[in-house]
Amino acid sequence: MSRRTQSELIEDLAQLYELSLSIGRSLDLRTCCDGFLKALLARKGLAAAVLWERDLDGGLRCIYANPSVDHGQLVLDPGHRIARVDQVFEVLPPRSWPDVLDGRLAVGEGIAFQLADFGVLLLLSVRPGTLGEVQCRQLVPLVHMFAVSVSGCLSHRRLDEEKRRSELLALVAAHTENSVVVTDAEGRIEWVNRSFEQLTGFSRGAAIGQKPGHLLQGPDTDPEAVERIRRAVRAGAPANEELLNYTRAGRAYWVSLSITPIRDGGGRTVRFIAVQRETTRDREQREALMHATRRLADQTQALERARTDAERASEQKSSFLARTSHEIRTPMTAIVGYADLLERGEGTEEQRRAWVSRIRDASRQLLDLAGGVLDLARIEKGPAAAAMAPVRVGSLVDEVGATLEPEAGRKGLGLTWQVPPDLPDVTSDARAIRQILLNLGANAIRYTARGHVRITAERAADGAIDLCVEDTGVGIPREQIEGMFQPFVRLQREEQSSEGFGLGLAISHQLALSIGAQLLVESTPGTGSTFRLRVPGAVAGAGVEALTARGSSGASDPDGRPFATPDLRGRRVLLAEDTPDIREILEAFVSRTGAETDVVCDGAEAVERVFLAQAEGRPYDVVLMDLKMPVMDGFEATERLRASGFARPVIALTAFVLGEDADRALRAGCNARLTKPVTSADLYQELERHLAGRETSADGTR
């Protein structure tokens, strides 16, 4: 070995020693790098050093430069270049560096070392020729020693950063409102925060070493969600679920669970962090919102249906009013016209009798229309309580058949009715059944041009009684059957299209519902229809006769002839009525009986006349009391008479047909009521019924 070689070796060893002392004093990166330059760079004629650290993703990040150059502007010649710091670095051969670095530092040669542990070191000389091959080889052990020292500095720095980051994360996790759980790679709990303890009721000591699922899952936890979490943990993948958990005390609560795997530098999963946010209240609010949304949608649909129904009802009512106007004007034209002819004295005696008969028929047609409208109003107001009592079906059917027979005869139709002799009575409302059968029978006669109408009764399979009205009329199309029981809907028929008001079937249907019965229909267009009233509740044994409700429809006996005028000579009748026309008509009806009649115009005068007659010893045998009068109405007048002890019959005269107002008269003390317009037959029946066999006395009692 030559003297120079030995000298260089000694110098290198000295430099290594000095370098080891310089860079070994501190684990700080800058101190280490500055010491390296002080001990080595100046002696070797090196002017600068730049150190890059390799990132986990393979990129390079500058961590040191001396002197402080703008390393981001370090661009080499086009053939051999170092791109910007965040791009790929390429080791360059000697003698390929530019003459000027960043416009400030004149350089000659440079050499770069790839340091396997962490990155790249670039050394730049001051003047050309100072980085020869020998010098480069001599730098290798020094650079390796420097690399070991830098690696230690970097490791120490990373540990400090990791410690600070861990402390910061622990501080955040400890004070967050969410529940945080840290598990090992097998899913066993290593750490929980305070919020976990408060939410679940499990202390940190009780939780450590356990698996969260064993502590928190219960009978209603979704097993499919649990299985998805297990698969994700086994695969080291993240997972997000909404899960039902249970506290230590057994309270169920919902959480939004997010599980994140933590990996080391080699990509191996070393632990999991699970963050749980309680969503019980959110879920309840969400479900309430969904329920409210569904309810709003239902209400919107209901409102839309109501709007559609209202529009349809409005159209139907408009059509009904138009038909009603026509039906009113047609008979009114006949009434006014024939009355005018009679007033002028025109026509023969036979013609005048015919005109009177037609006036009567037109008047009854108007009464039928008014009665239907009022019945509908009563139903829309609310069904009255059914008067449930035993009803003798045979007698009721006989009465309905006898009432309908004259009309069927005028059209040349055969009308028959038949009830088996062993048919039991039913517990129901006789008045409702009678009105339904009358409506059905009148419809059958109206829409049957030829053939017959038959009314029958039979026992149904379930013990109920079926009352059937069968006709051989035009029948009902299938598409019209569904809506035929709606108010204001009239069946569209090619024949007789102008008849009817669309009320009878609607009224009958509502009456059937009010007594717990069913109204069924079978029909074949061109052949006929059968309406079946199915009345439940057969009653064994004999029943009682259905009470007859007197009103405007009872103007004649079953044979269609007027009732005979009763002989009431020697009787006294007081008529209280404020309407002159009605007062004059009723006074004429009563006068035919031979009874003595007094007339007053209000309730107060009626009470005064009754008291005066009793004081004179000539009491009235019956009082005909209008309910709507000035000064004192009929309700109050009747109540005062009853309170004073007057026990003779009081018969109410009323235009009220809506149940509550009409029945109020009976509660006030009236014995019966007659609905206006009152016919002579109705009046005579009531007078005869209440005065037959009654003895008069001076005190007004029987």
Image (cartoon, rainbow, N blue to C red):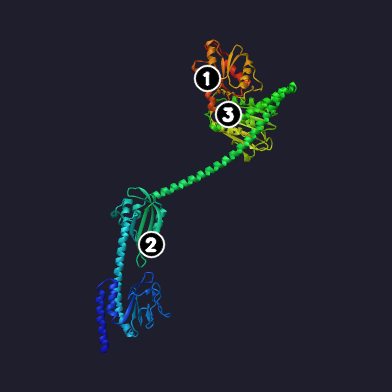
Quarter of the image for residue 396 reads top right
Residue 212 percent location from the top left of the image: 34, 55
Does label 1 or label 3 sit earlier along the sequence?
3
Q: Which of the two marks, 1 or 2, is nearer to us in this view?
A: 1
Kindly identify which residue carries mark 1.
Answer: 638
Q: CA distance from mark 3 to mark 2?
A: 80 Å
Q: Choose the circle earlier in sequence order: 1 or 2.
A: 2
- Residue 457 visible (yes or no): no
Does 551 appear above or below 76? above
| Relative to 682, 27 lies left or right | left
Q: Tell which of 457 and 444 is nearer to you.
A: 444
For label 3, the residue is 433
Give the residue pinned by disc 2: 236
Q: Is residue 521 above or below residue 168?
A: above
* Residue 611 rendering spot, x and y as whole percentages: 52, 14
- At 40% from the left and 50% from the top, the residue drawn is 282
Q: Secondary structure at mark 1?
A: helix
Give residue 133's mark: none
> Which residue lies most toward the front here?
104
Residue 459 is situated, as x and y percent measured from the top left of the image, at: 58, 30
Q: Quadrant of residue 134?
A: bottom left
Give the Cα separation between the discs numbered 1 and 3. Answer: 31 Å
- Residue type, numbered disc 1: Thr
Q: At x 26% / y 72%, what residue is drawn?
A: 26
Amino acid type of the residue tagged 2 in the rendering:
Gly
Disc 3 residue type (three-letter)? Ile
Tell me which label, 3 or 2, sits earlier in the chain.
Answer: 2
On the rendered structure, is 435 left or right of 164?
A: right
Occupied quadrant, residue 349: top right
